[in-house]
Image (cartoon, rainbow, N blue to C red):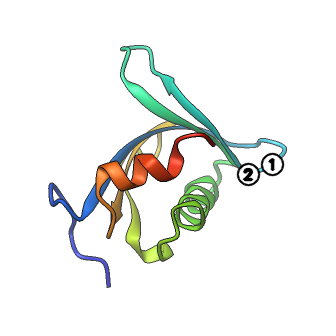
Amino acid sequence: MARSPSGTPESAHLAIRLTPGASADRIDGWGVDAEGRPVLKVRVRARPIEGEANEALVKLMARTLGVPKSAVAIQRGGQSRTKILIIAGLSEDEAKACLTGL
């Protein structure tokens, strides 16, 4: 069971820019949001209906990072395209290393 990872070295916080309704589930790499903060650009096939796009995001990130789905949670932005994910069991550096070059 995933612990509350807020602020621990064993958890990563990632800013995500989610695009639902894409032709394929994929991670497009790092970009910047309107305020100049780094975000990971992610596309999912699922539509933003009844949390389907959020569920697809969690599954894709868990698969990509090699962690159980229960270790990935949306901390903020459940109704927004910009989200903050918490990944338990990985440090921020480990998570970013897994995602670099995608």
Element type at mark 2: loop
Q: Amino acid at mark 1?
A: Ala
Q: Quadrant of residue 14?
A: top left
Q: Which residue is mark 2?
A: 25
Q: Position of residue 74 (x, y in %)?
A: 39, 56
Position of residue 61 measured from the top left corner of the image (x, y, whole percent): 54, 58
Instruction: Please state if 2 lies on the left or on the right of 101 as rendered.
Output: left
Element type at mark 1: loop
Residue that appears at 32% across and 70% down:
89
Task: Please identify the quadrant where the C terminus is shown.
Answer: top right
Task: Return the mark for residue 39.
Answer: none
Please report contact status of discs 2 and 1: CB closer than 8 Å, yes or no. Answer: yes
Give the residue at x 73% y 51%: 25
Outermost residue, right side: 23
Q: Residues within 10 Å of mark 1 (few under 14, many from 20)?
A: few
The vertical placement of 18 against 55, above or below, is above
Residue at numbered disc 1: 24
What kind of residue is marked 2?
Asp
Q: Is residue 32 left or right of residue 55?
A: left
